[in-house]
Amino acid sequence: MDLKQTFGEAKENIKLEKPSVIVLRLFEVITSWSKTVSIFIQYSRENMLTYLQENWKKKFMIALIHDLREQSYVDRQSYGDTPVVFKARQTSMAIQQSVLFYLGWRLAVDGGYDVGSESSAHNQLQKLLWFDAITKGKLKIDIYPDVPQVLKKWRSENIKVYLYSSCACGEIDGNKKLMNYTNLGDLSSFFDGYFDTNKMPQNSAESYDKMSKELNVAKNEILFLTRSMNEIEVAKSTGIKTVLVIREDGIAAFSVEDVSPFTAIGKLDEIVF
């Protein structure tokens, strides 16, 4: 959504009181969700089997395939005659092929891979492949062009910046690595720390209470930027200041009525302190 076209020039810049800390969600705040998914779907189709084979005997993969198998049988009960992950008595190649069939079916059901999801075995496997590709330089985090200069500006204003994401997964501390591997270079130096939605669910008020305590900062000194109205409402209920980010390539459809109760921006550089 183009905020200028939808809401007029009054929405071009948002004047806010300078916070002590800014907390950023990942997708559609600093990186494109649609680009991530489209690139990853193709990469997964071409590389998932190799990734399974390379990690097949590792503890994390054995546990994950066990969970994936159980999930596939639950899906069969819910959806009917669907692909399942073969039992452990089958050959490794047969099980791996069954994993690919099951993931292909999930792709059709879900309408796309969800590397940002916190739950389910198939999403965990997708994230592991995604992080593996990123850390090996095969894929990069596609950062919106306005982000680096804004992060640099906030740093110069002594504002601390934290990334709040669900990217930590398995043996990989994904949150801390993602910003090392972007299309615009290593941005990790602009971040003071990371919060993990697996440990601090973004739709729980308790998470924002905990965030404030860990930062040792009053809630009204924290500014939270996200694409989710629900997350905005939960964070606001605890006293945290919020901004709704509506990127032009965002997947959600917002009306003027939807957005009017919120402070909303289309790009990070529209915020002025």
Image (cartoon, grey):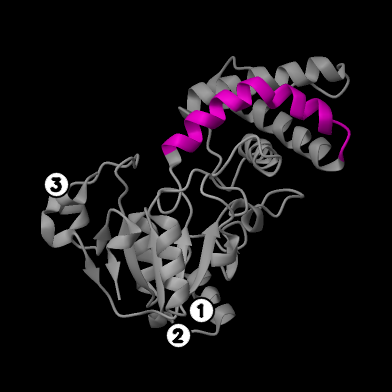
- How far apart marks 3 and 1 lie (CA) works out to 36 Å
* Residue 76 visible to the viewer: no
Q: Secondary structure at mark 2?
A: loop
Q: Which residues are magenta?
A: 34-58
Closer-to-camera residue (41/10): 10
Residue 142, x across and y down, in percent: 49, 43
Rendered position, 160 above or below 1: below
Q: Find disc 2 in the rendering and name its residue.
A: 218
SS majority, magenta:
helix
Left or right? Give the position of 52 relative to 35: right
Q: Within 10 Å of the Cα at label 1, are there few (<14), some (14-19), or many (20+) other Cα atoms?
A: some
**Residue appearing at x 32%, y 42% in the figure:** 252
User: Identity of the amino acid at label 3?
Assistant: Gln
Q: Secondary structure at mark 1?
A: helix
Q: Is residue 174 covered in magenta?
A: no
Q: How many numbered discs sit on the rendered protein? A: 3
Q: Within 10 Å of the Cα at label 2, are there few (<14), some (14-19), or many (20+) other Cα atoms?
A: some
Residue 17, x across and y down, in percent: 30, 80
Left or right? Give the position of 93 relative to 85: right
Q: Secondary structure at mark 3?
A: helix
**Residue appearing at x 87%, y 16% in the figure:** 91
Q: Find disc 3 in the rendering and name its residue.
A: 5
Earlier residue among tags 3 and 2: 3
User: Identity of the amino acid at label 1?
Assistant: Ser
